[in-house]
Amino acid sequence: MRYGITNILRSLPKSIALVCAAMVLTLSICIISQSIVTQTQSLEDVYSEYIIETVITDQFCIEETNLAMNSKYYNIISQNLHGIRDYITDIKIRSSFSSNYTYMFDDKVERELGGSVVGLTYLPDEEEFKHEFNLMPLYDESILLDSRPSCIVPKRMMEDMGWEYYTVRLRYDKQEENEFVEFNIVGTHEGPDNIYCSYESFNDELTKGTVSIYSFRFNLINSKYTGEVAKILKFYFIEPSIVGAIRRELNELKILFRYTFVMPKGNLDDVVKPIESDIRKLKIAEPFLFVLSVATGLVVSFMSTKNRKAEFAVMRSLGTGKAMVFFEAFFEQLLLCLTGMLLGIAVFFAIYRQNAVLVVWKIAVFFVCYMSGTAISVLNVALVNVMKIMKANE
């Protein structure tokens, strides 16, 4: 090792050149890796920030409301068919207005509901029903997507009862066979005497599965899932087509295909395709750098040792084994490579500072590739024919 270090210092200009070669390769790999990481993060940001709202329409892609859709379609959400809940959020399913209900609080006085009951899975904004909605402090919007019976009642109704009760019993019509169902009051609204219930409990407890869905829409959690979601929706809905084809068959719910899903991507492809193209080009360039590393290690080691064959032959003739000759030459290249790598990494962090992302495994691959080329060249020196070299120098 002392001999190797002495030889490095003795041939300082050559050693500096070898260090620079390793540094440039290391820096190139770090910069390409950083570019891939940066571009990939940019792509993820575009996908996560780009909102795609999927809307279920009639078979002609005209009507988005008043769909008169069988409530079985809610099973797609409630039963998480094909794992669709893993890809979507902001699920907005709503029923039509349903009237002829009676209600009572714990005072046991049965009253007729002047308005209607609506089942929904979300907290409406003021624009949809032309009045404001407010949830109680202990609840959030997800309660309406829950299976537990919950509802939002008129604020006036709570005021009339002196804010003493936080449950209400509802019954469809006045027929005795229709039992009262208790709902937790989770919020109030400023509008007329309508009660808004969580869709699942409304559908299962009050209407016994006969209610029709008025509207059905949701957002994608991430716009990169458009393919996965479209694949799932094709089991239940018609895919939009410029030819306007209508499927005369049953879907997975055993219902005729009558509705179409619309998933407008807008200019998403125009944004992501250039980024994806850049990432592909960078990933293609990476393997060539690793191949270049092998070649560089081979060439620089060969150039460094080609004029030292006589020196190694003397070492061999004095009793130095092949392994020791190999180790001496290899150690020199190893030390120069490590020095170049560390300098390359230091320059990389100096350029990118806090945004630098060091992909360690790629540096490790570069090191293995570079030293593999070095080993091939050094092995050729270690196996030198001593007698042939000595004769050539006579």
Image (tube, grey):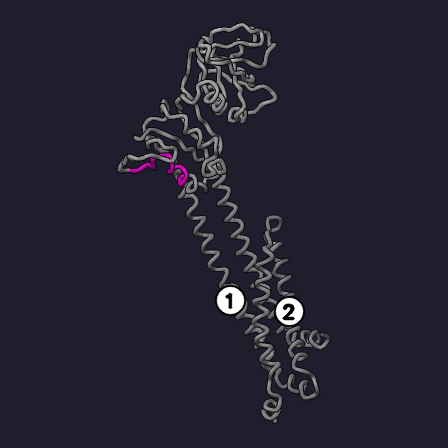
Q: State yes or no: discs 1 and 2 in contact (Cβ < 8 Å).
A: no
* In the image, residue 232 lies in the stretch drawn in magenta: yes
Residue 146: % across, % down? 53, 26
Q: Residues within 10 Å of mark 2 (few under 14, many from 20)?
A: many
Q: Which residue is mark 2?
A: 336
Q: Which residue is mark 1?
A: 291
Q: Residues within 10 Å of mark 1 (few under 14, many from 20)?
A: some
Tell me if residue 82 comes above or below residue 370 in the rendering: above
336 displayed left or right of 156: right
Does dot 2 land on a helix, a strand or a loop?
Answer: helix
Characterize the magenta stretch by its predominant secondary structure: loop
91 displayed left or right of 56: right
Along the line of sight, the residue nearer the viewer: 385 or 339: 385
Residue 79 shows up from this direction = yes
* In the image, residue 353 lies in the stretch drawn in magenta: no
Mark seen at residue 279: none
Quadrant of the snapshot with the C terminus: bottom right
Q: CA distance from mark 1 to mark 2?
A: 19 Å
**Counting residues from the N terminus, which is met first, the one under dot 1 or under dot 2?**
1
Observer-side mark, 1 or 2, equals 1
Along the line of sight, the residue nearer the viewer: 199 or 172: 172
What residue range appears in magenta?
230-241
Residue 192 shows up from this direction = no
Does dot 1 land on a helix, a strand or a loop?
Answer: helix
Residue 309: % across, % down? 61, 84
Which residue is rendered at x = 46% and y = 13% of the image? 178
30 displayed left or right of 316: left
Quadrant of the snapshot with the N terminus: bottom right
Which residue is rendered at x = 31% and y = 31% of the image? 59
**Amino acid type at image mark 1:** Val
